[in-house]
Image: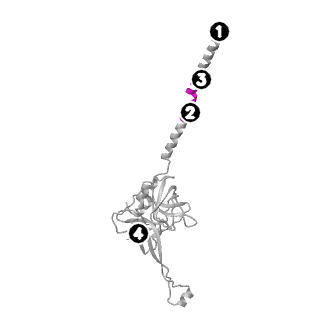
Amino acid sequence: MKNIGKLGVTFLLVIAGAFVAVWAYTRFFEKPQVVTVTETQHLKYASLGEEGGLPDLTFAAEKSVHAVVHIATQSVRGGGWTTGNPFLDDFFGFRNQPQQLAQGFGSGVILTADGYIVTNNHVIESAQNIKVILNDKREFEAKLIGADPSTDLALLKVDAKDLPFLTYGDSNNLKLGEWVLAVGNPFNLTSTVTAGIVSARARNLGINESQMAIESFIQTDAAVNPGNSGGALVNQQGNLIGINTAIASRTGSYTGYSFAVPVTIVKKNSGRP
């Protein structure tokens, strides 16, 4: 009987020890790091999904698209000097070629409700007639107020009131990686919006042929093509931060980088508050 009693006590001690071991493992080893890290990671990824996702650019697009205009120009080219004598013209190399009507297209940005519009100088250079087409299809004949080849900017005026316009942003505070929108009329397609980020600031490309050229371009990867010249580069708030001017391309079409004149230069040259 003694042996049976000892075995019973031993068995009870073993069972009690097993319960204590299971309790201790559950309390100190099983619950800690594994569950906590999983929950922390889940919360962290959820936070990144909210803060690090793509921005909502619909407000900026809607605000800016109505203040960007389509510009159509006409200019007369050709018509060489002649002596009036075909023999002398041939002998001296003169050619009395007939004049040709050339058409050009670009974009512009309305700066004021009463119709002041900024564009690129190369959009309106040598043009005899300048037409401005609004996003609502209204058309106006534009008057050239002034042009500055050194910054490739020009200021136009149309006779209109209560026009939608863009307010100036601050191009000096742009950050690399900041989202921006390019708004214009590429390939004669009106009211086109593309998005990208600021890739670089204060780029000097040497593309302005003026001897007194001033270049400090904002570089972005927003898609810009022929016809976008003079259009708006806006930030996420829909404020004007630049005038789209050029692209880096071997084909004449967008291949990855575009360049805009910063609004700090626009403000100095436009004379508009």
Mark 1 — residue? 2
| Screen quadrant of the N terminus | top right
- Residue 81 or residue 258, whichever sits in front: 258
Q: Residue at x 45, y 76 (%)?
A: 75
Q: Position of residue 262 (x, y in %)?
A: 46, 59
Mark 4 — residue? 132
| Residue type indicated by callout 3 | Ala
Q: Residue furthest top?
A: 2
Residue 37 lies within the magenta run: no
Q: Residue at x 55, y 31 (%)?
A: 32
Mark 4 and 3 residues: CB-CB less than 8 Å, in contact?
no
Q: Classify mark 3: helix, strand or loop.
A: helix
Q: Classify mark 2: helix, strand or loop.
A: helix
Mark 2 and 1 residues: CB-CB less than 8 Å, in contact?
no
- Separation (CA) of disc 2 from disc 1: 48 Å
* Left or right of 16 on screen, residue 202: left
| Residue type indicated by callout 1 | Lys
Q: Is residue 95 above or below residue 233?
A: below
Q: Residue at x 65, y 12 (%)?
A: 4
- Separation (CA) of disc 3 from disc 1: 28 Å
Q: Which residues are magenta?
A: 23-36
Q: Going from the N terminus, do you reach mark 4 or mark 3 first?
A: 3
- Separation (CA) of disc 1 from disc 4: 113 Å
Q: Position of residue 245 (x, y in %)?
A: 49, 64
Q: Position of residue 82 (x, y in %)?
A: 50, 86
**Mark on residue 21?**
3
